[in-house]
Image (cartoon, coloured by chain):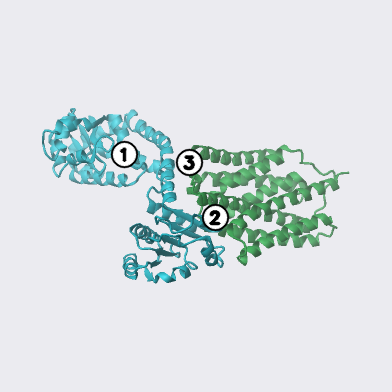
Amino acid sequence: MNLFCVGLSHHTANVETRERFSGHAQTDCILRGAGCTEALLLTTCNRVEVYGAAAARVSTEEIIRCLARQIDQQLCQDASAFYRYEDAECGRHLFRVTCGLDSMVVGETEIFGQAKKAYESARASGAAGPYLHRLFQRAFRAAKQVRTQTDITRGSVSVGSVAVDLAEKIFGHLSGRKVLVLGAGETSERTARALVSRGVSDLRVSNRSMDRAAELARLVAGRAICFDEWPEQCREIDILITSTSSEAPLLTPENLAPMLRDRIDRPVFIIDIAVPRDVDPSVNEMEGVYLYDIDSLQSVAQQSLALRRQQIAAAEAIIAEHVADFWESGTARRCADSTHSAMRESPLRVTEL
Amino acid sequence: MDRYLLIVSSVCFLAALVRTIAALRAGVFRPGRFNFLAVGLGFIFQTAFLSIRGRALGRCPITNLFEVFIFLAWSIALIYMLIGPAYRLSLMGAFTAPLVFLIQTFALLAPIDVRHAVKLPANPWLEFHASMSLVAYGAFALACIAGVMYLVQERQLKTHQLRSIFYHLPPLTDLFAAITRLLWWGFALYTLGLASGFFIGEPLPRVQVVCAFGVWLLYAAILQGRHFRQLAPRRVAALCIVGFSAALTLLWGITFTAQMHSLP
């Protein structure tokens, strides 16, 4: 039995090309018509891949034709963007994909869910049988092991989630924390939403335009505060998100010091996403104040990404073990063969796998 | 024979230390259960050693500098075993193991296991005083370790340079709560130990008493500063390191002078 993967991804093709080969509702059926015993289509915004098992080799061109949304002249040109992996290499590729090693953002976990969904859908339609079942189950196991034994998914890689992660590193649980959003911009809205999703319930919004403050407060289930009151609010709050269009810094060590006088053992986390900045950088040197501007948040995101890249070798080692165990032992192949012949005798057993 | 138990115990702490260093070098710092198990196993061997030594001496095994260091290492491991899982500070094992390993290895290698020519008479007040003080030192040692963890994390947050270890450290507020609890526990035990010293029935060297009160006052000042919000958490964390260094120096002085006095 020939186990193979044919596809294209962000590594080999641009979005226009990927769009042309994103498959369609009948792709599974057509693939099986082309000679695949089992076939599974994995489509995400970054990749289009077909995983299949066939008694005889199915050509790459045949698969490309099955994936094409329209048969046109450009088909032959685009064929060069496709890659093909067979047997053990096919396994290795899938394991790397589910672990997030082949993703645009290394270590992202969304692909795991997408692969799982694709597998469930193929299994439900009967397009995936024992070969793909074993291959995908092993891929999910490998991905879980990589996730728990390496730091490949550690740290956040977007500004909003970095801010929320840092808040959790300072305060622990965010449920009892008070947040003030100063300036009702789009990024502060996203960050406020992220904080709410992690349990923040006391959220105050202040803006020069009270209408805009009220609108954002309604969107994030917070309450609007008059703009003149924000200095007073700083005495109570734990997290400040600021993004006003002020030309001069709103917060300086001089005006922040009196606000912090009574809260020496309560840290304050300031997220300054305004350009020009709303907070004087020297505020970060004050006791118990953690100031992050847009550049430092982006720098943390880059550090997380670099940290994830450092973990690639460790993740590859785990994957290599799984590939060796899955393929070189030959057990998987024998098991699949015997299960496959048993299934031909009794189709009901597919659901038992 | 009993020293072999201690060597095995040191190997357990060394295992935790090696794993921590390897993880740090690889940029993968994961506390996991290994540190807790390694410290737990080391603690069991320490307990076996102290039990055998205590039975042989017919009293609490803190009769020389060697035994005092082992008892201190045991106290640190004990407090870690008690508070580690309770306050989600499993990572503390990674910091505790090196400290215990260093104390224990020094005790094993240095020629300080001097047996007394004459069997020392049992004095329950003296044993209570010494053992309470040493357990208090264990709590102060853990507060010092938590202080180091706090400062490491605080520094990374301030400089915006987050390393692998950052993602495994407990939140700042949790760490500070643990430091405060450890300080209170240590202070209460130390006060008990200090008070019981007055019932020993033997005259105590004036310098020792003054130094012991100095350490007590230092911790009292830290706790007062914390309680009345006069000290920022970062300063409390730094003072935990200063306090434990002072306590350790005092302990060295006490046992060293006690040994000098016991020499014929």
Residue type indicated by callout 2: Glu
* Residue B9, picture quadrant: top right
Residue type indicated by callout 3: Val
Residue beneath the point at 45% across and 62% down: A250
Image-based side of B261 in relation to A323, left or right: right
The alpha-carbon separation of the residues under discs 2 and 3 comes to 30 Å
Residue beneath the point at 67% across and 52% down: B242
Q: According to the image, label 1 marks what residue?
A: A97
In green, which chain?
B
Residue type indicated by callout 1: Val
Q: Decide which of B40, A105 is in the foreground and name it.
A: A105
Q: Which of marks 2 and 3 is in front?
A: 2
**Quick one: which residue is furthest to the right in this view?**
B264
Task: Determine contact: label 3, label 1, CB under 8 Å.
Answer: no
Q: What subunit carries mark 2?
A: A
Q: According to the image, label 3 marks what residue?
A: B28
Query: Is label 2 on the same chain as label 3?
Result: no
Q: What element carries label 1?
A: helix
Q: Colour of chain A?
A: cyan
Q: Residue A285 carries which label?
A: 2
Image-based side of A162 in relation to A333, left or right: right
The alpha-carbon separation of the residues under discs 1 and 2 comes to 43 Å
Q: Is residue A298 visible?
A: yes
Q: Position of residue B262 (x, y in %)?
A: 85, 47
